[in-house]
Each structure stands twice: as structure tokens, then as C-alpha cells.
Image: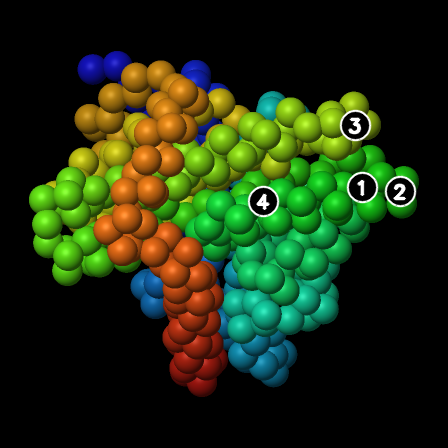
Amino acid sequence: MADALADLSEQHVSIWLDDISRERLRTGNLQDLIDKKNVVGVTSNPTIFQKAMEKGDAYDEQLRELKKREIAVDGAIRYLMAYDIRWACDVLRPTFDATGGEDGRVSIEVDPRIAHDTDRTTAEAKGLWWLVDRPNVMIKIPATEEGLAAITAATALGISVNVTLIFGLDRYDLVMDAYLAGLEQAQAAGIDLSTIRSVASFFVSRVDTEIDKRLDKIGTEEAKSLRGKAGIANARLAYERYEKVVSSDRWKALEGAGANRQRPLWASTGVKDPSYDDTMYVTELVAPDTVNTMPEATLDAVADHGRIAGNAIQGRYDDARQVIDRLNKLGVSYDEVIEMLEVEGVQKFEDSYAQLAESVRNELEKAS
């Protein structure tokens, strides 16, 4: 079988791992994935860190040091996360250099509890950028209404931003506008635009999970025929909007000044329904200038039996629109689902952060 991961790379799809842990770093596992599975970036979120810190003893030494310094829980979380992110940035630095900064990126997320506070999100982005202190770090900012202004503000300061928790097409338009506005402000401030990078993380599988539930309740043959199709259709239509923006005069002026495109990133690509092909959110979303961030199980599945058949997005926009239209005609409201998913997405990260804080609090108490 052909090397599907290499085929993805040849299609100008960047493969990023949606996971990080100190154990993965100290065992050299991340380096192995870079060497053997075409991984060129890493993303993280509160859920990933919460799971990482519950396993093994990799964080014990730093926890003891933090306790001696009497660092409070929130500060301890930042130090623990920044340590891993900085280490991963160093591992990926050769990739960063070889790709001129396009890849070799590692993302760390702002505190999700402030997702609806523009000023605090901007301050947190600045703080994490300073704390990690690596040129290949990306700061993840949720695409809430309040997050949009923070995306602009952070970009204007020269911070590379990974915009996360994008579900809907109209919100994606605003995300792209926020990035361009930030670049324009950075240019006016004399910042070298070529040093700024951004990705826009469009969540895929969660759309199907919610819409499939609604289709199952309807139960008709028409409803059954649409199961597992909404997430991919939504992402394809997002790419169509990306193409529109990068062909605009506004973008071309920025690109002429050295700006880099904000690449679409397909997130939440692990298949939730076991009846689906476990590689479909990778093989069905192949297009140039994209990133696919995969949990390791999905990465392994693509390496084992994925088949990359070239560009799977361009030229399929009408079919994608038909999927959304058919859903709406069945009474499955696209707008309602998207709104619910954003609220739920922020809440899930808040819940994970609360669990992470509880774990760190307990570990600090036990440390000696």
C-alpha cells in the first residue's frame, strides 16, 4: 500500500498531532512521529493536558518545585503547560526552520474560562506568548464573539494565533476578517508581516455527532441517507469561503506586503461513530494549504489503511450545499446546531480546565 501520510504531505496537507504529554516528549515518541509519520506540528487543549497529567510521574518533579515556590493552582497550570509546549517547540524547531515558519508549530490555549472576555483573552495571549518564548508557538483563541476582537488584537501585536472552536460558516467569515484586520494593524505598526502565522480550526466530527442524533430521531430513509455527511459538507463550504478571501483585493494587498495565509485546519477529526470509516475526516478533506490535526488513533488508521485520492474538496461545493439544504428541509436547523455546538464546545473546555485544576491542586498537596 502507498504511504498515505506521505501522499497527504504531497497534497500540501500539513499533519499535526492533536496530543501532547511530557511522557511523549521524554521518551522521544514525538520525534519518532516526526521522523516516521510525517507529523509537522502539535496542538493541545485543556482536555489533553488534563489527561496527560493524570498518568505516570512525568510531572512530579516540577510539581514539587512549584509547591516549594508556593505557586497557586492557575499559575502552576500555566507553568506546567508552558514547559511541555516549550519542549515540543524545540523538538519541532528544525521543521519550523525548514518550512520557513509554516509548520513546526505547537499550540497552547488561553484559559477557556475567559472565552467571553476580550480584554482578558488578549492579556492571556500576550502572557502565554511571553511565557513560552518560542517563535514557533501558536496561541489558541476560541472563535467566540468576544474572541474575535482578541484575535485581531493579538495578531496586531505580532502573535501567531490558532483560532479554535469554529463550527459555522458565518463565524468563519468573521474569523478571517479578524485576522486580516490584525494584519492591517500590525502593518501600520511597522511589524514584519512575514513573521505572523495563523490557522483557523474548523471542527468536523462534532457537527456529525449532533446532526446524526437529530436525523436518528426523524428516522426516515431520507434522514438515514444524510448521516455522517454534514461535517464534511460544512468543512468543504468553509474552504470555498477561504478561497474567496484569498482571491480578494484586500488579501492580495496584504500578501504583497509579506503576509501569510491563515490556513484552514480540520480539527475534531477522530471518528465518533464506529460504523464510519475511521479515516474519513482525513481522506475526504484533502486540499492544498490545509492542516489536519489528528489524534494518534486517527494518525495510525490513516497510516495503516488510508487512501488519498487527490483533492477531495475543490469542485464539490454544490454537493456540499445540497447536503445542508436537505438537512434544513428535514427540519434539522444548521444555524441552531452550530450555535449549540459553540456553547457546548466552550463549556467542555471549561469543564476540562476545572478537572485539570482539581488534579493539579491534589498533586500540589501530595508533592513533597
Q: Which residue is mark 2?
A: 188
Spot occupied by residue 138 in the image (x, y as percentages of width and height): 61, 47
Alpha carbon of mark 2 to alpha carbon of mark 4: how far? 23 Å
User: Of callouts 3 and 4, which one flags the residue occurring earlier in the amino acid sequence?
Assistant: 4
Residue flagged by tag 1: what amino acid is it?
Answer: Glu
Few, some or many residues within 10 Å of mark 2 (<14, 14–19, 20+): few
Quarter holding residue 13: top left
Q: Which residue is mark 3?
A: 253
Q: Which residue is mark 1?
A: 184
Alpha carbon of mark 3 to alpha carbon of mark 4: how far? 18 Å
Q: Is there a contact, CB below 8 Å, between mark 1 and mark 4? A: no
Judging from the image, the colouring scheme is rainbow
Residue 46 visible, this orientation? yes
User: Of callouts 2 and 4, which one flags the residue occurring earlier in the amino acid sequence?
Assistant: 4
Dot 1: element: helix
Q: Is there a contact, CB below 8 Å, between mark 2 and mark 1? A: yes
User: Of callouts 3 and 1, which one flags the residue occurring earlier in the amino acid sequence?
Assistant: 1
- For image coordinates 59% across by 70% down, the residue present is 116
Q: Please tell me whether residue 279 is drawn above or below residue 338 in the rendered image.
A: above
Few, some or many residues within 10 Å of mark 1 (<14, 14–19, 20+): many
Quarter holding residue 191: top right
Dot 2: element: helix
Alpha carbon of mark 3 to alpha carbon of mark 1: how far? 10 Å
The circle on residue 173 is 4
Alpha carbon of mark 2 to alpha carbon of mark 3: how far? 13 Å
Spot occupied by residue 209 in the image (x, y as percentages of width and height): 26, 54
Q: Is there a contact, CB below 8 Å, between mark 2 and mark 3? A: no
Which mark is in front, 2 or 3? 3
Q: Please tell me whether residue 99 is drawn above or below residue 326 in the rendered image.
A: above
